[in-house]
């Protein structure tokens, strides 16, 4: 069945931050909604790219990439409401928001929210399994 999804209404169904909720499927990807505030953890995804679309508020994406010599460089990108950022697989990142921010995520169904953490571990207290709403 084909449904129209009201994103504003879906955001009213949960209050928890850093706990994505699935609202749809597209091929082998989930469309997720998440509320964020404060900082997440440094992590990367070995096999998945991620799309972050800011619906409300503003998000600061911290990035760690390698320069030509392989040395890490940290940068920051502000993403405003109505803007998106795509994080390629393998890039370390840490989303943050000063005030509560609403994000739409598009990512493969296999994506774990904490990916591989900066210390090389997978899974932590911040790891959650997204549920449908």
Image (cartoon, rainbow, N blue to C red):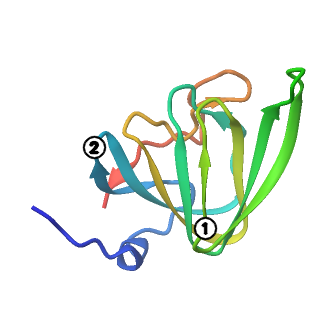
Q: Is residue 28 left or right of residue 2?
A: right
At a point 48% along the width and 43% down the height, the residue shown is 128
Indicate the secondary structure of the residue bearing disc 2: loop
The mark found on residue 115 in the picture is none
Residue 3 percent location from the top left of the image: 18, 68
Residue 121 in picture, x, y percent from top left = 64, 22
Residue indicated by mark 2? 27
* Residue 67, above or below 87: above
Residue 85 image point, x, y percent: 62, 55
Residue drawn at (50%, 34%) of the image = 48
Residue 60 seen in render? yes
In the displayed structure, 92 sits above or below 9; it is above
Label 2, residues with CA under 10 Å away: few <14, some 14-19, many ≥20? few
Q: Is residue 13 left or right of residue 83?
A: left
State the residue at coordinates (79%, 34%): 65
Residue at numbered disc 1:
83
Based on the displayed image, in which of its 4 quarters is residue 120 positioned?
top right
Q: Is residue 131 above or below residue 36?
A: above
Query: Residue 12: x and y, percent?
Result: 41, 76
Name the secondary structure under disc 1: loop
Task: For residue 39, say whether it is visible.
Answer: no
Contact, mark 2 vs mark 1 (Cβ under 8 Å): no
């Amino acid at each position: 069945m084909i449904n129209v999804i009201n994103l504003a209404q879906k955001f009213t169904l949960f209050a928890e931050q850093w706990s994505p909720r699935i609202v749809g499927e597209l091929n082998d990807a989930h469309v997720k909604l998440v509320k964020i505030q404060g900082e997440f953890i440094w992590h990367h995804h070995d096999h998945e790219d991620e799309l972050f679309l800011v619906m409300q508020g503003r998000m600061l994406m911290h990035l760690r990439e390698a320069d030509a010599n392989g040395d890490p460089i940290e940068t920051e990108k502000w993403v405003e409401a109505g803007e998106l950022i795509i994080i390629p697989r393998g890039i370390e990142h840490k989303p943050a928001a000063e005030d509560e921010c609403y994000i739409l995520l598009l990512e493969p169904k296999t994506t774990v929210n904490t990916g591989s953490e900066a210390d090389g571990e997978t899974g932590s207290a911040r790891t959650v399994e997204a549920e449908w709403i």
